[in-house]
Amino acid sequence: MNWAGLYTVLSGVNRHSTSIGRIWLSVIFIFRIMVLVVAAESVWGDEKSAFTCNTQQPGCNSVCYDHFFPISHIRLWALQLILVTTPALLVAMHVAYQQHQEKKLLVLTGHADPKHLEEVKKHKMRISGSLWWTYVFSVVFRLLFEAVFMYIFYMLYPGYQMVRLVKCEAYPCPNTVDCFISRPTEKTIFTVFMLVTSSICIILNMAELVYLVVRACARRGQHNSNPSSRKSSFYGHKLSSEYKQNEINQLLTEQDGSLKDMLRRNPGLHEKSDRCSAC
Amino acid sequence: MDWGALHTILGGVNKHSTSIGKIWLTVLFIFRIMILVVAAERVWGDEQDDFVCNTLQPGCKNVCYDHFFPISHIRLWALQLIFVSTPALLVAMHVAYRRHEKKRQFRKGDQKCEYKDIEEIRRQRFRIEGSLWWTYTSSIFFRLVFEAVFMYAFYFMYDGFRMPRLMKCSAWPCPNTVDCFVSRPTEKTVFTIFMIAVSSICILLNVAELCYLLTKFFLRRSKKAANGKQHPNHENKEETKQNEMNELISDSCQNTVIGFTT
């Protein structure tokens, strides 16, 4: 399981995202994960072996390195990217759950042929109702994780510039020794690059949040002014149309009377189905 | 055979798991295996090369390293992940056995077999009941046991979860007591705590799944006992079917009407 595996898992989510969400996912994979894997990892690859202190004292090197780099940039970025991309899986799980419900409905109404089942899998879910809330929460969590990691970065490595020389006096180093960092300029460039892409991702997430909220408010406004436009899920909509009603009527007459008998015997079932208000 | 292959094998089990089981599998692969592969292995990569002792005595460094790190964290985690994910294969084997039986029934032309073709048998998702329930529950139980055993082994071997910077070693052939320095101790502590935290989350998920299965089992049993006394079988099936349908419709179409006209 590596970055390619994560890509496989997340590309499925792409289909149910907004357009801004898709742009965000592309930025994450191309400008952050790919840059991390093909470039940044080689820059930081010799960070410890080429960290040299001006002393022969054994152990001074290790201790000074640990003092100045409690956790490497590369690992921080890897953790950040994993935590930032994972909330999208909440949406994937919710979509899978909704698809499962729709399939169950198809089976119960007797439309469980492969064509309809394939359609359930292929069609794009509308981001409305409980899915909207899940999506908004996932975007909020993404923002939160990005902000937390940027703050951690700032705390651990004040300023984002990598210096060439650090002075260290931790035991067992005798007095104060000069320690030299490998490739400081290249590291600074990549740190700034990752910071900029992180900020772009934060801006995209905020834009997506604003877009979702505005769309929800607009839809609500439309609801209130035009009740007949109420539609939610794909099959809910289809089932509410006259055509489907006719089909159900046909089913009722075709059945061996058991459904009709049940309705006659249990008038309460009428009320249950009329729980959905008129459209 | 690597982590990718394990992912392929266990992905098949996913279909027959409960929702909590699917979440557990996702947490396992993304927050444990993936972190191990992309981050932790690099941190521990130079653990022996950069383990430095304040002595020129040949052999002292090797002996001290071996004394303080009988088995590396990375290897322990790899073993833990393999042991913890393997009980799911019991479920996979049971499902494969059931499928095999159904295929045999289908080929014999058994009247009771309700499948139209072999493909349907292959695609079908089995409900977790009967003997499959017992297999599934035992697999969760074993997972819990393995997680707990490895967490204990970790704690026992490394005396708490913190990695110290300096260790004092006096094993032969080191002269007297020498100072030995561990490489990247802070980073190692951070990752150890992270892996322990995720391991605890997995334990909680397993406990939750166990409770869920037990609750479902007892509910089903009491429903069967209650139904057996009240209604004849076929009428009840129709009623529950209609109730399910109504619920699904009202869930999926919040503001649409389904009216039954007679």
Image (cartoon, rainbow, N blue to C red):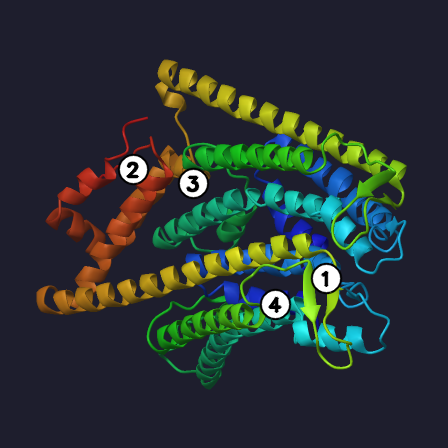
Q: Position of residue B71 (x, y in %)?
A: 65, 74
Q: Determine the secondary structure under disc 4.
A: helix
Q: Which residue is mark 1?
A: B182
Task: Using the rendered image, report if marks 4 and 3 lie on a common chain.
Answer: no
Could you tell me which quadrant the N terminus of chain A lies in?
bottom right
Report if the CB atoms under discs 1 and 2 are less than 8 Å apart. Answer: no
Report if the CB atoms under discs 4 and 3 are less than 8 Å apart. Answer: no
Q: CA distance from mark 1 to mark 4?
A: 19 Å
Residue furthest to the bottom in view is B108
Tell which subunit mark 4 falls on.
Answer: B
| Label located before the other in sequence (1 or 4) | 4
Residue A192 appears left or right of B98: right
Label 1 or label 2, whichever lies nearer to me, is 1
Could you tell me which quadrant the C terminus of chain A lies in?
top left
Q: CA distance from mark 1 to mark 3?
A: 61 Å
Label 1 or label 4, whichever lies nearer to me, is 1
Tell which subunit mark 2 falls on.
Answer: B
Give, as a three-letter code, the residue at label 1: Val
Tell which subunit mark 1 falls on.
Answer: B
Rendered image quadrant of residue B211:
bottom left
Q: Position of residue A223 (x, y in %)?
A: 39, 19
Q: Determine the secondary structure under disc 2.
A: loop
Label 4 or label 3, whichever lies nearer to me, is 4
Give, as a three-letter code, the residue at label 2: Ile
Report if the CB atoms under discs 1 and 4 are less than 8 Å apart. Answer: no
Q: Which residue is mark 2?
A: B258
Give, as a three-letter code, the residue at label 3: Tyr
Give, as a three-letter code, the residue at label 4: Trp
- Sort mark 3 into few (<14), some (14-19) or many (20+) by Cα contacts within 10 Å: some
User: Where is A17 relative to A278, above or below?
Assistant: below
Residue A145 appears left or right of A107: right
| Label located before the other in sequence (2 or 4) | 4
